[in-house]
Image: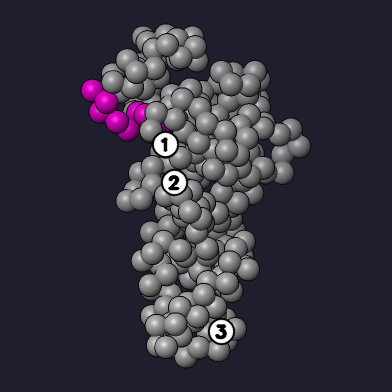
Amino acid sequence: MAAAQSVTRALKLLKIIMARADSGVRFSELVKLSELDKSTAHRILEALERESLIYKSEGTAAYYPLVASHLENKNKKIKIVFAEVIRALAEVTGDTVLLMSRDGDYAECLERQSGDYPVKALTTEIGQRRLLGIGSGGLSILAKLDDDEIRGFVQRNLHEPALAAIGEESFWEEIRACRKLGYALVGDRITSGTRSIGVNFMRQGYDVSLCVVAVNSRMDENRLPWLQEKILLTVKPLEEPLQVKGLAAALN
């Protein structure tokens, strides 16, 4: 009887969280809606987290449901962590911001947010995958690897037309430039008339790049260091999650 009661309570909490998949549910609200006492609710939520059925956002302290596959779970966590960062960066720059995450030899676009500049540079769709090194996001991720890992990547993917079009010598020049500058810069490769800057962030649990994409006229040499600075500033508060809210105002 006790075991059945525990299952019922867990399912009650899980159903509440699943019903609020987009906004999440904070602990106090879960206690109120489930009519469970705090200690019981806390114990059940910890068990659901251990089983990767739910995820607690460090930034908002809200609980979110997770899906079945490990990769989807990981990507959902990354999107939650970077949600406010992407929104703030798009607001401050006025341009399109991409969140690219490494998946083996590829980078996948997990999220895209457009700023208020009237000419949109929509070079990449959410869910789209590109070989590392082709876009600025994948290039910034690849540049953080050691040379032997990069050589292995090149050998595995020499047959890919996108990589062959760049050429191995030019490819290595771009890697070296990225390491020197601290960001990757790609222009006109994916969509004519656009440039993008990508900065890689590798932490426990994720290896991603934040990219700002805009028309060429907005990506001159004077603006690029400013964009890099804004990208780095947006990510810095992730070390102190409670300060992420209101990030755009702090960057202005």
Determine the secondary structure under disc 3. helix
Question: Which amino acid does the dot numbered 3 rest on?
Answer: Ser
Determine the secondary structure under disc 1. strand
Dot 3 or dot 1: first in sequence order is 3
Do labels 3 and 1 touch, CB within 8 Å? no
Residue placed under numbered mark 2 in the picture: 71
Q: Position of residue 18 (x, y in %)?
A: 58, 66
Q: Position of residue 131 (x, y in %)?
A: 46, 25
- Report the Cα–Cα distance between label 3 and label 1: 38 Å
Determine the secondary structure under disc 2. helix
| Residue 162 falls left or right of residue 171 | right
Residue placed under numbered mark 1 in the picture: 103
As drawn, the label of residue 213 is none
Q: Position of residue 213 (x, y in %)?
A: 59, 33
Q: Which residues are magenta?
A: 140-149
Question: Which amino acid does the dot numbered 2 rest on?
Answer: Leu
- Report the Cα–Cα distance between label 2 and label 1: 9 Å
Mark 2 or 1, which is nearer the eye? 2
Do labels 2 and 1 touch, CB within 8 Å? yes
Residue in the foreground of this view, choosing between 24 and 201: 24
As drawn, the label of residue 34 is 3
At 51% from the left edge and 45% from the top edge, which residue is drawn? Answer: 230
- Which image quadrant: the N terminus? bottom left
| Residue 93 falls left or right of residue 142 | right
Q: Position of residue 211 (x, y in %)?
A: 52, 37
For the question of whether residue 87 can be seen, the reply is yes
Residue 39, relative to residue 215: is it above or below? below
Most common SS among magenta residues: helix
